[in-house]
Structures are given as structure tokens and as C-alpha cells.
Image (tube, rainbow, N blue to C red):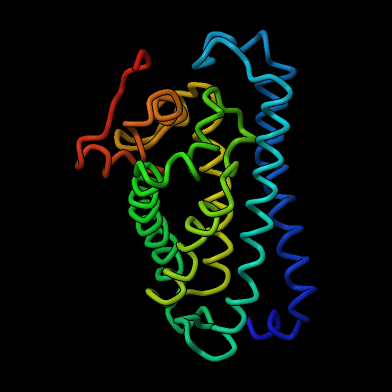
């Protein structure tokens, strides 16, 4: 981490922005090309909604997602300040906590993020906030992989809040944080695929594209990100494609 802080902040911001965009284009682009272009006719049977999003929708999904990634990367200025002043629980040597904790810390990040995401998502659906912020994301009722980060700027800032929460809450190594950020991009894209890929559902309480599609068409249900635990606990889970 010390070596990263030696890079000029503006250059570091450009590197981070480039990495986020590259990962987004790669993670969203491959399944979009596979399912929506070359496999458009082949995989029709597992398309959750029979229709396909138009080019204007896809353009807007990409546009707002890129804006979100711009906001996400801009957080580096504040994060650098916290790191340089020793305010976070960052540690530089893996041996300080060991490999098992490194793995455990990533799992902890996912669990914390799932809870954070559920309640922030519920907040965004409050009647005084929804039409000004989260409604933008819900305009994409038939989402594609490009929709993963198509948020209103205010919502982007709120969702970014998971990073400082983790930085201050648990001991973390920069490798663990990079893995976690990659998982965020992968899973947010996964639940917006628009296809019911049953083989990618590993356990019962895993959130899937089918579950999240219910939310895009009926905003009263299925607020979860990685799991359906909070939805089931709070009575907001619905497993019904006709919702």
C-alpha cells in the first residue's frame, strides 16, 4: 500500500478509473456478447423476459454506469487521506494476520456489504427519495449486463459508502480489498444478466438474476445483492416471475 501512495494522487485516480472501466467492460461485455448477440436465438428459452432491451436503453445503461465508476474512482482522494494519516485498519504484510484471515476478510466484506446494500436499497425506495434517485435505475425494467451500475449520482455516492465502512471496521489488506471490488463488479453484473442461469446458483439463499428481475418489475420485493437472507428475514422476498 505504501508503494501505491507514492504515486501522484491524480495519476492514481486515472489508474483506478481505468481499471474499473476495464473490468466493467470485460465483465459486462463478455456475457452481453455471448447471450445477447451471438447467442440471441440459442438462449431464448432461458431469457427471463422474452423481449430484449433496445439500443437506446443499452446506451443509457452504459452512460450511467460509467458515471458511477467515475464517482467511485473519485473516492480515492479521500481514501488516500485516511490511509496517509493512519485512520483505517489497513495492514501491509499478509503474514501479520496470515492467509486464512485474508480469505476470511474477503468473506466478511461480502457479508457486511450484503447487509449494507440491502438497507441502503430499502432507503432508496423511500417515497421521499425514490423518484429523485433510484427511479433512474428502475427505468431499466428489462435489464442487461450493462445495467449493473446505472445509478443516479447520489445513489452512487451512497453505494460507495461500503468501502470506507470496511476500511474503518475490519483489518484489511489491499489485495483483499481489490478482490472484493472485483467481486462487486462480477456479482452486480451477474444479477443483471436477464437470463436464468440455473447452473450458477450454488446454494438456496443465493440471489440470482431471476430474483433480481422480480425487483426490476416489482420494486416492493427482492432488495438483496448477494443473498436473499435479509429479504426472507424482513418479508420482502418474492419468488414469482409473474409479480
Taking depth in this image into account, of 12 and 123 the one nearest to the observer is 123
Q: Residue at x 56, y 59 (%)?
A: 179
Tell me the quarter of the image containing the C terminus. top left
Q: Residue at x 74, y 78 (%)?
A: 9
- Identify the residue shown where x is 80% and y is 73%: 11
Closer to the camera in the image, 140 or 165: 140
Query: Total label count?
Result: 0
The picture quadrant where one finds residue 238 is top left
The answer to which quarter of the image holds residue 212 is top left
Residue at x-position 55% and y-position 22%: 142
Residue closer to the observer: 242 or 181: 242
Q: Is residue 109 left or right of residue 14?
A: left
Name the residue nearer the viewer: 60 or 50: 60
Please state the horizontal and vertical placement of residue 177, each as a whole percent of the image: 53, 66
Against 47, residue 74 (above or below) is below
Q: Position of residue 3 (x, y in %)?
A: 70, 83
Q: Is residue 136 above or below residue 243?
A: below
**Quadrant of image for the N terminus:** bottom right
Q: Position of residue 207 (x, y in %)?
A: 39, 36
Can you give x and y, in whole percent of width and height, for residue 105 in the image? 41, 66
Q: Among all residues in the image, which is located at the extreme bottom? A: 85
Amino acid at each position: 500500500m505504501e508503494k501505491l501512495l507514492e504515486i501522484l494522487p491524480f495519476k492514481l485516480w486515472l489508474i483506478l478509473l481505468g481499471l474499473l472501466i476495464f473490468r466493467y467492460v470485460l465483465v459486462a461485455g463478455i456475457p452481453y456478447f455471448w447471450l445477447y448477440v451471438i447467442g440471441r436465438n440459442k438462449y431464448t428459452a432461458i431469457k427471463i423476459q422474452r423481449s430484449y432491451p433496445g439500443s437506446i436503453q443499452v446506451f443509457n445503461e452504459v452512460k450511467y454506469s460509467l458515471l458511477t465508476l467515475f464517482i467511485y474512482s473519485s473516492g480515492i482522494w479521500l481514501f488516500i487521506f485516511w490511509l496517509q494519516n493512519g485512520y483505517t485498519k489497513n495492514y501491509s504484510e499478509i503474514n501479520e494476520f496470515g492467509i486464512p484471515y485474508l480469505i476470511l476478510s474477503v468473506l466478511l466484506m461480502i457479508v457486511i456489504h450484503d447487509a449494507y446494500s440491502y438497507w441502503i436499497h430499502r432507503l432508496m425506495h423511500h417515497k421521499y427519495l425514490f423518484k429523485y434517485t433510484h427511479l433512474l435505475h428502475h427505468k431499466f425494467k428489462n435489464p442487461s449486463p450493462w445495467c449493473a451500475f446505472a445509478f443516479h449520482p447520489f445513489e452512487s455516492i451512497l453505494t460507495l459508502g461500503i468501502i470506507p465502512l470496511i476500511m474503518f471496521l475490519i483489518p484489511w489488506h489491499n489485495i483483499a480489498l481489490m478482490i472484493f471490488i472485483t467481486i462487486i463488479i462480477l456479482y452486480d453484473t451477474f444479477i443483471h444478466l436477464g437470463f436464468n442461469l440455473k447452473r450458477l446458483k450454488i446454494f438456496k439463499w443465493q440471489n440470482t438474476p431471476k430474483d433480481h428481475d422480480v425487483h426490476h418489475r416489482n420494486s416492493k420485493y427482492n432488495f438483496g445483492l448477494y443473498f436473499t437472507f435479509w429479504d426472507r428475514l424482513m418479508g420482502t422476498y418474492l419468488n414469482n416471475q409473474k409479480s
